[in-house]
Structures are given as structure tokens and as C-alpha cells.
Image (cartoon, coloured by chain):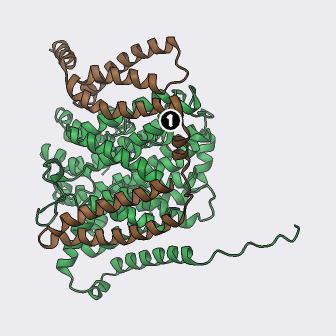
Amino acid sequence: MFEGLIHALTPITLMFEVLGVLIGIIFGAIPGLTATLAIALFVPVTFLMSPENGMIMLSGIYAGAIFGGSISAILLDVPGTPASIVTGWEGHTMAREGRAPLALSLAAMGSGVGGILSAVAVLFLTPALSSLALTFGAPEYCALLIFSFAIVIVMLETPLERNLLSLFLGLLVTCIGLDPVNGTPRFTFGSIDLMSGFNLVAVLLGFFCMSQAVFLGLESLRSGEGKVLESGKSNAYGETFRELASRPFTLIRGSISGILLGILPAIGPTTTPFLAHAIERRFNAKDPKWGKGSITGLLASESSISANVGGSLVPLISLGIPGSGAAAVFIGALTLHGLQPGPTLFTNDRVLIYTFFWGFMAVNVFMLLFGLFGARYFAVVLKVPTSVLATFVAVFSTLGAYAINNSMFDVWTMLGATAIAVWFRAIRMPILPIVMAVTLGSLFEQQLVVLNATYNSAVSLLVRPVAAAFMLISVIMVGYALYRRLRPAPAPQSNPGA
Amino acid sequence: MYVFSLLSSAVIGAFLILFGWKASSIIGVAGTYPIALIVLSAVLLLLIFVQDSRQTRPEVPKQIEGLIATRGTLRMRHLGFVLLWAIYPFVLQGLGFLVSTSIAVTLSLWLVSRPLKVGFVIGSVATAIILTLALALLMSTVLYIPTPAGPLDDALANLLFSFSS
């Protein structure tokens, strides 16, 4: 293990760690350029390097891209990657209040701490965590996914029936394409492009980036030329450390949620911050700024996203099972370097694997430092006129959609999603349940089919305690939300002094 | 907004009817899941439609209020901005990245900037060309992301290749 540490700290390896993080941050900050795309594009570059340096650079790109997405989410409310949607709620409100450097520094610290804690987990707990991942079957997956949907439905302020309709419409959209079991075409209307359904990233670009460009353009016209926001105090280090020190358990809870969700195959970083944010809300029920500039919410979201990156490496390294799309590309990179992911990796390439683990920890330290000390420079974006921002968000949304598959179909998908986002905003129909449905819909249907084939009655599911617990919590949450909505409003108290 | 809300429900209803009709022709279990979703959605949509029809003055979100309140030239310019980015992908395919993006960025800056001064109008053309060129170089040499190519893009790629070889 310590031989790995020494290898991870050699100057050449440190250089690749820094390079990976920088490339990742650039990719992540540009809407549409995801961590998966960044890793896929840089896999050929790693052929020239030793396997451990190649893997470390790719992990730097992965971690950097996930953090980079938060920079544009905080500054412009345009999530660079789908994982940064929740960060945008909290961070962008802080930026609007003139606290952009603080929000960026806190995001960097939260992200860095989450990443470092996940690196510790990867280093010491990989075998134990992998066996936990293997206990998850179709009932647990279905229950966990229903729990994720329930959280989103309950936490939104819009009426329950609108949230549910939005969720079902999203799930219906994921039915477009080939059915996951028999390969039967559904709702394709004879189009070959529709056979594989709509690309998630293209849809999210429309929902969150291009629609934001439409409103930024309007804002620029209505308010005239000038700055979007005040960037605020450029040196916020003292405040950052104070805020961080007062919330250690938020970071720990966020990181644990991220690691545990990361080790579950197919639960990628997009879903994690929603769950971590909702869990943290239970501990901070009285926070008046929750969802609108809460520091606790921002830290919970950021720590969980980065921890998810580390968590997804656990099943990848020990079992050869990818925890996310980016991790799947990572497996390809390992194979191309002649390494076989799985338990044999620990026996055959022990030094290499520990070098990679320590390198991943160093990557997170660099990411923290870049984010912390670069916050004041990132915040310069706020001095750019709104008209320029609107224009470039539109350019990047289009190019980002095109870059997914080098296909114009994804660009049309993105434009269609933009129109739906603006339309749904006008009729007070929430977008978030659709996002969750589009992200998790295919997995949900697959697991439902497996569940249906494996279990004959609902009673037999009770022998799966994890699944039963998730289902029970989901029912209680939705039931309580329904009760709160249906109960008569309390009569206003008379003011004795009046 | 009242009529718009009701019309929107009708459009979603039409979407559900279309999908329901298509789902009924899917053979086997592949159709069961979407049919269940369509039925649940239809029930909820009906509930929302009844609620909306009772609410003659629905609450309008702040951003949409701004969109409705914008009138005259400003509304036309905003509409132009939206149309520009809707047309941009068509032009991108035909003219390539460098030409179409330079034109689109320039027009976009003109459309959403206020006040529109002569210096800005001229400066925005130069800014658009320089930024597009920088973006093209970043995409092709650092990030390895392909962009739709036209004659100018091919020329730039050849130039870069001749430098590297």
C-alpha cells in the first residue's frame, strides 16, 4: 500500500494528476460536455503513458469534470453536467446575493472533502463495499428508485398531482425506443433515430441550458447592458472555513450517501445530490434558505457528487461492474491497458492499483485547491454582460448536444426539450420529476420486468428488508404530503394587540 | 393564461391519446408498462384540468410574467433571438462551424444587447470572429470534439495538419 503512495507522489504522476483535474474542470464547466465524454475522448491519449498514470489522469478528468459542472451552475444557473442541478439551486442564489466566491469556495471544499472521504473508502473498504453492492437485487433497486421518485415529488412546492403527472410523462418518454426486454420498437413512428430513444444529456441541455439562454436574453433586453450580478468579496477563505467547520456532519452525511449510491450500479452522480439534499433537509428542517441559497444544502450536494465518483470506482475495480456511465468508459480504458477489472487486479497488479487509489486521493486534493484558490478568477464570469452570456450559453448548448453523438438529432432533441421547459414553466408544471424519470426510467422498467419475472406476489417481497424499508418510507412520505395538502388550513390567530 | 392552461392540458391529452393508440398496437408485455403510465397520466391530467378550469386567474411564474410583459421592439428582438438559435443548427450543417457561428454570435449580440451603439455593432463582429476561431481551435486541438465542417473549417484543419507535420 505504501509503495503505491510513493509512486503516486512522483513528479511525473503529480503532473498527470494536475493535468487531469484541469482538463476535467474545463470540460465540466462547459454545458453539455460531460465527464463521460471527457474520459472517452482522452482514453487514446493515455496509451502513451504507463497504465497507472493513465488511470490517474482519467480519474482526475472524471473528478474535475464533476466539480467543473458546479462552476457554471453557481455562476450562471447553467449546470455544466447533469449532476450539478441541485448545486445550481443553492449556489446560484448565493451568487445572486453577491456571494459567488463564497459559494464557489464552499463547493470546492465540499467537493474536495467528499472526494477525499470516498478515496479513503476506496482505499480501505473496497472488498466490504463490493459485497454490499452485490446484495442489491431487483426488489431493492425498484424500491430505491421509487424512493428517489417519492423524494422529488414530495420536496417540490408545486401541487402533488402536477409533480406526479410530470413524473409519469417523463417515464412515458423513456418508453420511446426499443423495449429493454424484447427489443420491440415503441412509439418510434418509423424513425430510426428514435429507436435508441432520446439522449439524456441532450434533454437536460434543453431543460437547463438552452432554456436558461432564452431567459438570459430576455433579462439582458429588459435590464439593458451591464453586469449580471455583483461578484462579491473576492477573498472569502476565512468565511469558507468557518462555515465548513460548523457543518462537519453535513459533509460526512453527504459523503456517505454519495459513496453508498456510487457503489450501486447505474445510480450515477445525477441522482445522488437529489437524495443527499433531501436527506440533509431532514436534519435542517428549520433552515429558512433551504433550496434558495442554503450553505448546508450546497455542501450536502457537492460532497455527495464527488463521493459518488469514488464510490463508483469500488465495484469497477473489485468486480468489474461500472457504477456510472463514466465508470463504464473507465473499464474500457483499463482493458485497453491490458488490465482485467475484478478481484484478480488486487493480486496481479497490487502496486498499480494502490498507486491508482492514492493518486485518486491526490487528484481530489488538487481539485480542492484549484477550486478554492481559483474561485475569485471563476467569478470574473459574473462581470461578462448578460447578452454575451446568453449568446455563449446558446452556442455551447448547441455544440454540446451535437458533440454527444456527432448527430443533429440530439440538437433537435435539445431544442424540443427547451420548448417543453419554457412551456411547462408557464403552466406551472415542474421539470424536475421529468428529469428524474428520464434519468432513471429505463433502469426502473428493466428492474420492474426482472421483479415481475422473479417474484409472484408482493408478500414475498417482505423477506427483503431493505426493499421493504425503502417502500415503507416512500409510502409514509407521500402519505404525509397528501395529508398536509388535504387537511384544512388552520384558522388565522387573532392578534390581541390589534 | 387561463385559456393557455386549458389549451396546454388539451395538448398533453392529445399526446396521451396518440401514445395510447400506439401502445394498444404493441404486442406482449412491452405494451403493459406504457399503457399503465398513460392511464395514470390521464387520470391526473383530468384532475388538473378540472382544477385549472375553476381557477380563472392562475398564478404566473415570475420569469413568464417578464416574458408576457415584454412588448413592442423588445419582444420582437427577443423573438428574433429565439428564432436565430432555432435556425442556427440548419445553417451549421450547410456552412460549417466557423462561418455559421460567427454570423450567429454577431446577430445574437446585436439582438439582445441594449443600447445598441455603433462602436458595439462593429466591435461585436470582430469579437464574434475571434471567439469563434478560438473556440474552433480549442475544440479541435485540446478537447478533440468534432464540429460540423464547411469549406473554411476544412481549410483550418489542413492548416493545423500542415503545422503539426
Answer with the quarter of the image where residue A151 lies: bottom left
Q: Secondary structure at mark 1?
A: helix
**Which residue extends farthest bottom?**
A459
Q: Position of residue A373 (x, y in %)?
A: 51, 34
Q: Which residue is mark 1?
A: A218
Please identify which colour was used for chain B in the image: brown
- Comparing A228 with A318, the one in front is A228
Q: The C terminus of chain A is located in which quarter?
A: bottom right
The subunit carrying tag 1 is: A
**Is residue A314 positioned above or below A8 on the image?**
below
Q: Position of residue B58 (x, y in %)?
A: 55, 58
Answer with the quarter of the image where residue B27 lies: bottom left
Answer with the quarter of the image where residue A64 lies: top left
Q: How many marks?
A: 1
- Residue A125 visible in the displayed image: no
Q: Judge from the rendering whether residue A179 lies leftward or rightward of residue A229; answer left or right.
A: left
- Residue A81 visible in the displayed image: yes
**Is residue B93 positioned above or below A310 on the image?**
above
Crowd class of label 1 (few under 14; some 14 to 19; many from 20; radius 10 Å) = many
Give the residue drawn at x 24%, y 86%.
Answer: A457
Q: Position of residue A371 (x, y in %)?
A: 47, 38
